[in-house]
Structure formats: structure tokens, C-alpha cells
């Protein structure tokens, strides 16, 4: 079954693109918010969709139009690999995902402050009460299990703990007059069964690594101003969905990207 997650419902324009993801999807406007947002805070032009059978999450929206130079800078940023606080190589794309699309909930950050005041270490996000059913926080936990802290004298440094990930691609595509940006990474640690249960995720995710995709599609290219659709997808790495298949869905059936 194909469900058209249609940008027409997001932006109200007649020339909007449909995103025909296969499967049965639920719409969740209450899941959309800026960094560290929690609860109903819908943003115009963005919508969240969830497939409860597979645990896949799709965030679909419109961009205020990257120009040609900006598109190159976005790809450059997505391609960067730097060393994190533990000295381990880490994709910049991972930081972008957790900052922009999969932030830890406000209640987790507030709980950590209380624990630090009491001289306790922050706990993993999945140990937070009331976390069941919080799909976005589940995917946040696969990028980062939560915060950590180091104490030096009277000073306490809080830092993000990071899950090992592998950058699959970060590139720009040109398809006839259209343009696209593709980024994709996968975690290197499988989903723990108990963690999945705490979030109420489908049992089939246990033992699977997780894939994150980011696709920007500009029907008129990045040279001229026009509608640009952004799709952020998260799901099991054994899914047939990846940044390439998302782009093909945006392009339309039978049209290949170069």
C-alpha cells in the first residue's frame, strides 16, 4: 500500500510534491518542535509521520530555499568527520540530527540538572519516567544515550555521550534541471531489546542497527528560488528505505538519479 505523505498539506501550494512512502502511516503534528522541544508545538510547513508496524519515522517539510552556494556548504558540513569529546571520530551529520530533529526531551535535561545538584551522574534517556511511546526520543537515544558529566574541583562539565556511527553518504546530486542533497548514516550498535521495550517500539527493531536519512529535493535546482522538500527518515537499517529510495520517490516512479 502506498500512502502519499503529501507536501500539499504542509504548504498549501498547487505544485507541491507527494512523497509516496510504502506502508500505513500515522500523522503526528504534536511531535514537531524545535531543539529540546517537548509536547504539542507544531511548526507550519513540517509534519511527522510514524509507521507503527516497522517503527519508521518520517519528518517531511519545506525549506526556505538553499541557493547554489548554500547547498555546497550544507554538503560540506554534512561530510565533516571530527573527534568528539571522547576523541572518537564522529560525523557532523550525527550532531545535526540530534540538535535539529531528534533532541533529548526537556524533561530529561531538567532531570539531569536535578541529579547533578544532588551530586549524581546523569542517567540514560531511556530510564526517564513516561518515556514509553516517545518515538522521537527513541531515535535520539540511538544517536546518543544521553549526557555525561566530569567534575574538576568545584566545576562540573556536562557533555553529550555519542553512539558509534558510520557515515554512508553526504553528497549533492543533479537530475536534469532538479537538484538534491543526500545524507545517510547508520549506528554501529544494535537496538537493545529492553531499551526498545521501554520506548514501546516494535519488537522487530531489537538487534537491528538504525539508519538515518536526510534528503533535500529542489525541483527547480538550487540556482533558482523554488519549492524545496526536506525528508528526514529514521528506521531499521535492514529496511529497503534509504536516501536513494527516498530521492527516487521524490523524483517519481521510474526516474533515476545520476
Image (spheres, rainbow, N blue to C red):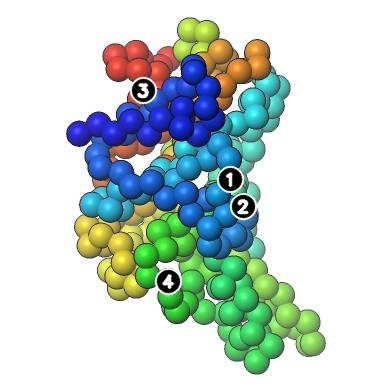
Q: Nearer the viewer, mark 1 or mark 3?
A: 1
Instruction: Tell me if label 1 and label 3 are in contact, CB under 8 Å.
Output: no
Q: Is residue 248 left or right of residue 157?
A: left
The quadrant of the rendering that contains the C terminus is top left
Observer-side mark, 3 or 2, equals 2
Q: Kindly state the secondary structure of the residue where label 4 is placed.
A: loop
Residue holding disc 2 = 34
The residue carrying pointer 3 sits among few (fewer than 14), some (14 to 19) or many (20 or more) residues within 10 Å by Cα, namely some
Q: Which mark is residue 131?
A: 4
**Which of labels 1 and 2 is toward the front?**
1
Under circle 3, the secondary element is helix
Q: Quick one: label 2 or label 4, which is nearer the N terminus?
A: 2
- What residue sits right under mark 3 in the picture? 248
CA separation in Å, label 1 and label 2: 8 Å
- The quadrant the N terminus occupies is top left
Instruction: Residue 121 in the image: state x and y as whole percent.
Output: 58, 84
Q: Secondary structure at mark 2?
A: loop
Which residue is located at x 62 percent, y 76 percent?
Answer: 110
Q: Residue 223 in the image: state x and y as whole percent.
A: 65, 13
Name the disc covering residue 43, or none.
Answer: 1
Label 2, label 4: how far apart the Cα atoms are: 19 Å
* Label 1 with label 2: CB-CB less than 8 Å: yes
Relative to residue 116, is residue 11 drawn left or right?
left
- Few, some or many C-alpha atoms within 10 Å of disc 2 (few <14, some 14-19, many ≥20)? some
Image height of 224 relative to 75, above or below: above
Q: Is residue 258 visible?
A: yes
Q: Is residue 107 above or below residue 187?
A: below
Amino acid at each position: 500500500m502506498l500512502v502519499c505523505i503529501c507536501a500539499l498539506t504542509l504548504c498549501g501550494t498547487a505544485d507541491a510534491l507527494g512523497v509516496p512512502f510504502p506502508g500505513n502511516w500515522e500523522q503526528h503534528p504534536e511531535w514537531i518542535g524545535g531543539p529540546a522541544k517537548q509536547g504539542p508545538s507544531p511548526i507550519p510547513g513540517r509534519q511527522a509521520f510514524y509507521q507503527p508496524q516497522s517503527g519508521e519515522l518520517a519528518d517531511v517539510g519545506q525549506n526556505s530555499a538553499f541557493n547554489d552556494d548554500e547547498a555546497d556548504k550544507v554538503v560540506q558540513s554534512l561530510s565533516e568527520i571530527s573527534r568528539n569529546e571522547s576523541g572518537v571520530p564522529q560525523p557532523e551529520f550525527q550532531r545535526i540530527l540530534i540538535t535539529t530533529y531528534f533532541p533529548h526531551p526537556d524533561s530529561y535535561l531538567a532531570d539531569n540538572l536535578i541529579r547533578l545538584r544532588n551530586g549524581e551522574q546523569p542517567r540514560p534517556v531511556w530510564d526517564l519516567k513516561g518515556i514509553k511511546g516517545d518515538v522521537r526520543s527513541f531515535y535520539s537515544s540511538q544517536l546518543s544515550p544521553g549526557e555525561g558529566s566530569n567534575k574538576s574541583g568545584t566545576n562540573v562539565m556536562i557533555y553529550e555521550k555519542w553512539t558509534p556511527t558510520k557515515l554512508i553518504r553526504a553528497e549533492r546530486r543533479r537530475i536534469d534541471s532538479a537538484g538534491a542533497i543526500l545524507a545517510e548514516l547508520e549506528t554501529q550498535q544494535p537496538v537493545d531489546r529492553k531499551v526498545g521495550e521501554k520506548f514501546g517500539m516494535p519488537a522487530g527493531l531489537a538487534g537491528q542497527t538504525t539508519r538515518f536519512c536526510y534528503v533535500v529535493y529542489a525541483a527547480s535546482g538550487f540556482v533558482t528560488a523554488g519549492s524545496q522538500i526536506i525528508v528526514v527518515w529514521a528506521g531499521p537499517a535492514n529496511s529497503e528505505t534509504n536516501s536513494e529510495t527516498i530521492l527516487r520517490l521524490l523524483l517519481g516512479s521510474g526516474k533515476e538519479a545520476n
